[in-house]
């Protein structure tokens, strides 16, 4: 793996965050959803306005992963009231973790998970949780391999399509 640098994203980097958010969501899920549902999700959850609000939220943190001066992926970590579901104050949620297709398989996703673990420990959290689509066996296998275990399910709405995510937790 080449030298990876992870930095917190600021509001000045909103354009780059918006671009990578839309690109990675489309590339990962575009072929599995109708264009209408995909666009509705992007408009509701990945708009510049929404991302700016989330960047300014004290319990939501975004991080870019950089390699050789290029952004290769990003993560979004939530605590407290920033979590998409209330799993308690001792939890850190990984709401998003995406690596651009051309950089997948190089260990960058694992590095972002390790970074999330460090953030959780720094913040005094005892668990990390995330939701992963039940129809994404590659991601499920990745999370299981590093120690996440299924603790339940929740609905992840993509436009008009309610999809089932596995809720997985890693104890620190």
Image (cartoon, rainbow, N blue to C red):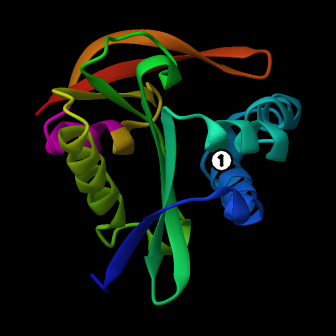
Q: Nearer the viewer, residue 108 or 33?
A: 108
| Magenta segment boundaries in residue numbering | 140-148
Residue at horizontal 36%, vertical 45%? 138
Q: Nearer the viewer, residue 72 or 13?
A: 13
Indicate the position of residue 165 as horizontal and vertical percent values: 46, 20
User: Which secondary structure type mostly characterizes the magenta part of the structure?
Assistant: helix
Dot 1 alpha-carbon crowd within 10 angstroms: few under 14, some 14 to 19, many 20 or more: some
Q: How many marks?
A: 1
48 is within the stretch colored magenta: no
Viewer can see residue 119: yes
Is 69 above or below relative to 73? below
Is 65 above or below relative to 169? below
Is 125 above or below relative to 117? above
- Determine whether, in the image, residue 34 is placed left or right of residue 61: right
- Determine whether, in the image, residue 60 is placed left or right of residue 138: right
- Determine whether, in the image, residue 131 is placed left or right of residue 24: left
């Amino acid at each position: 793996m080449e030298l990876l640098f992870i930095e917190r994203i600021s509001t000045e980097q909103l354009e780059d965050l918006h671009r990578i958010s839309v690109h990675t969501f489309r590339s990962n899920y575009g072929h599995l959803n109708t264009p209408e549902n995909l666009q509705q999700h992007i408009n509701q959850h990945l708009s510049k306005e929404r991302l700016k609000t989330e960047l300014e939220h004290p319990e939501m943190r975004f991080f870019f992963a950089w390699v050789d001066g290029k952004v290769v992926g990003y993560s979004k970590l939530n605590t407290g009231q920033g979590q998409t579901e209330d799993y308690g104050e001792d939890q850190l949620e990984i709401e998003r973790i995406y690596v651009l297709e051309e950089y997948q398989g190089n260990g960058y996703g694992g590095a972002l998970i390790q970074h999330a673990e460090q953030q959780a420990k720094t913040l005094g959290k005892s668990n990390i949780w995330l939701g992963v689509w039940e129809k994404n066996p590659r991601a499920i296998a990745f999370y299981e391999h590093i120690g996440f275990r299924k603790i339940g399910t929740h609905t992840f709405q993509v436009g008009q399509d309610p999809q089932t995510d596995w809720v997985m937790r890693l104890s620190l």
